Image (cartoon, grey):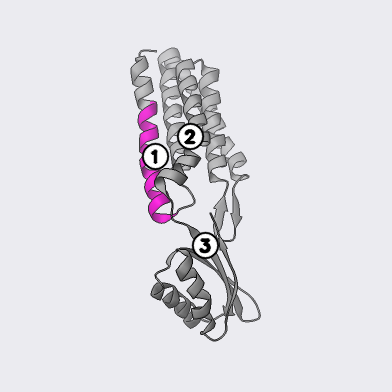
Amino acid sequence: MDMAIWEVILRIGLSVVVGGAVGMQREYKKGASAGLRTHILVSLGACIAMLTNAFFLDKYGKDATDITRMAAGVISGIGFLGAGSIIKDGVRVRGLTTAAGLWVVACLGITAGAGFYLAAGVGTALVVIVIWSLKGFERLVIKKKSQSLIILKTINDPNKIIEIMQTFSQLKLAVSSMDIDETDEGAATVSIVAAAPEAPLAQLTGELAKIKQIRVISIDRMD
């Protein structure tokens, strides 16, 4: 391949930096489901796919069209397998990192099968580091805000939702997401994910109890 070894490593390394920068911001600021490791794996997989495509074109020239079409089919098809590992648990979504890992492994498999050993080796090492090592990094360095899942039962009335949100605002509880499950009996189950220290959460139950027709079902730490 005409591309120098240092340039291959530079491109792969840059993809990790780009994915990590965006992932860190999403996880620390927003508490999003797709965080640091997921963003890095997706960025890394995309980079490896493009490098492999360039390798095909450099090695086979015009004859690479059919080969790259097969590789594209593999990458697209693995998405169905990855989707099966994603689970929605109330307002939480789990399995995104696993799905991203499956996708990037598919890219690495294509790269290895193409004989592009440098990219396959460097990519595999980085994937192992991201999956094994960065989970601890997320906890120690990023210091992600502790989040709790609050489940409430109330009547199906928009005014009650407004009162609930006002209570959270007064106690300075930052709400990340809210899910409302309406029932036929005119009731609704409200699931809220909020970032907050222990003290405001302890006050939350008492404040919500003052509001008529609202009952706290559970408050559980997510970390």
Between residue 6 and residue 175, name the one nearer to us: 175
Q: Is residue 30 above or below residue 105?
A: below
- To which residue does mark 2 refer? 130
Q: Position of residue 180 (x, y in %)?
A: 55, 70
Between residue 203 and residue 67, name the one nearer to us: 203
Q: Secondary structure at mark 3?
A: strand
Q: Residues within 10 Å of mark 2 (few under 14, many from 20)?
A: many
Q: Position of residue 125 (x, y in %)?
A: 49, 25
- To which residue does mark 1 refer? 20
- Figure quadrant of residue 183: bottom right
Q: Residues within 10 Å of mark 3 (few under 14, many from 20)?
A: many
> Residue at (36%, 37%) from the top-left corner?
18
**Looking at numbered disc 1 in the image, what kind of residue is underneath it?**
Gly
| Main SS of residues in magenta | helix
Q: Which circle's residue, 2 or 1, is located before the other in the chain? A: 1
**Looking at numbered disc 3 in the image, what kind of residue is underneath it?**
Ser
> Residue at (45%, 14%) from the top-left corner?
60
The magenta stretch spans which residues? 12-31
Q: Position of residue 35 (x, y in %)?
A: 45, 46
**Looking at numbered disc 2 in the image, what kind of residue is underneath it?**
Val
Q: Position of residue 218 (x, y in %)?
A: 60, 69
